[in-house]
Image (spheres, rainbow, N blue to C red):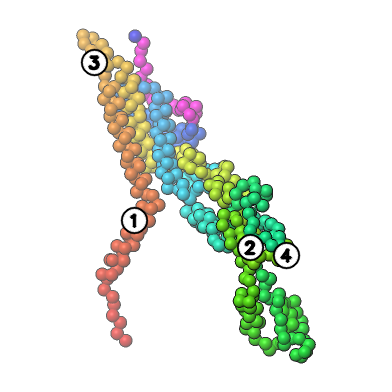
Amino acid sequence: MPQTAIWPGSSSFASGQTPFGIYDSDAQFSGSGVNSVDKFADWCAKRLGYPIMDVEMQSGSFYAVYEEAVTEYSAQVNQFNIKDNLFNLTGQSTGSNMTHRNITPSLGRVVRLSNLYGQEATTPVGGYATLKSGSIMITSGSQTYDLNSLYAQVSESGPIEIRRIHHGPTPAIQRYFDPYATTGYGTQNLIEGFGFGSMSPAITFTLMPLFEDLLRVQAIELNDQIRKSAYSFHLVNNQVRIFPNPSSDFRMWFEYYVSEDKESSLQVPSGSSNLGVISDFSNIPYNNMVFAQINDVGKQWIKKYGLALAKELLGTIRGKYTSIPIPNSETTLDGDALRSEASTEKEILITQLREMLEDTTRRSLMERDKDESDMLQEKLQKVPLPIYIG
């Protein structure tokens, strides 16, 4: 029967002796400090019974479980950080490593959502779909026009959503008539000296109040509304009916969205891209932690978890044979018991770590701060107020 390799009593770590080499270049991991992998191997072997009992493990096994314990701690903390920060990081570049970085909450996603609401306003003020413009020819005597067949299928090859139709009378200011400024009523005053010469109307009297101009414009618009057919339209399913019945040919303009652009869930601001940005749990850039930056609380958890892993590995090794012969008898190995203990210890350690992390979520901290503020306010209310006598 071959001789079983046992722990020799000491080890001397060299870079490349861990399975993945993730922390081999970290001086605290590979050096001679209290948290080094050699110190862990010595402590772990003694916790497993050495030198009173042989430990059927070599230094490489201790190095492997220590590396796994560090990566497990890193993964657990990173999972918590991803869950706590995903809302604020979605849409950010995946090129930046978020590990060990303080993530400041922003209104980025709220603003982007507000942009979409702004897109639905009567006069669009936001959104990511491009507001386009188009036109069709209106012919004399024809009131009804199908914008789907006349424009959408020709210019966009798909459905469009009309947002605004430019159809109305000429502005009243263009038909403004000032009887006081005509030749028959006095001298025309061109007030270039006041900078009004380029304004409409360019001809007015200096002392005329501004409401006079406004009343005149309103009179023109009211006259058009009562005495003439009002300019309007009726739009249903991109079928537009023009009022009044056109008496001449002209071009009518409108603004619209391409339905596919507006309804797409992959909309991004102009000049941006959906590629190379954080989209979900799978591509948020949290990497393995830097071992030297893990505090002593975390390193203590790592040691305990590493011991549980070593106990599990030793139980697997001893479980190869349930008993071994000794002179005049045989002895039973404790492989099953070691594996059972290791499984329980690992589960407890993971549960404790997750509970601790949940207690430090952004929401939990804000609730705790609120409770502290309320309790402080209640305490201050019981402090007697001084009375000042003048």
> Which residue is farthest left?
328
User: What is the spatial separation of the Cα atoms under label 3 and label 2, in whole angstroms?
Assistant: 101 Å
Q: Which residues are magenta?
A: 2-21
**Are the residues at dot 1 and dot 2 in contact (C-beta closer than 8 Å)?**
no
Q: If you read the primary sequence from the N terminus, does the residue marked by circle 1 or circle 2 appear first?
A: 2
357 lies above or below 70: below
Q: For the residue marked with disc 3, what is the amino acid?
A: Thr
User: Which residue position holds label 3?
Assistant: 331
**Are the residues at dot 1 and dot 3 in contact (C-beta closer than 8 Å)?**
no
Q: Is residue 253 left or right of residue 368?
A: right
**Are the residues at dot 1 and dot 4 in contact (C-beta closer than 8 Å)?**
no
Q: Which residue lies at the image location 64% right of the left edge and 74% below the top edge?
A: 228
Secondary structure state at the residue bearing disc 4: loop
User: Which residue position holds label 1?
Assistant: 368
Secondary structure state at the residue bearing disc 2: strand
Camera-nearest label, 4 or 3: 4
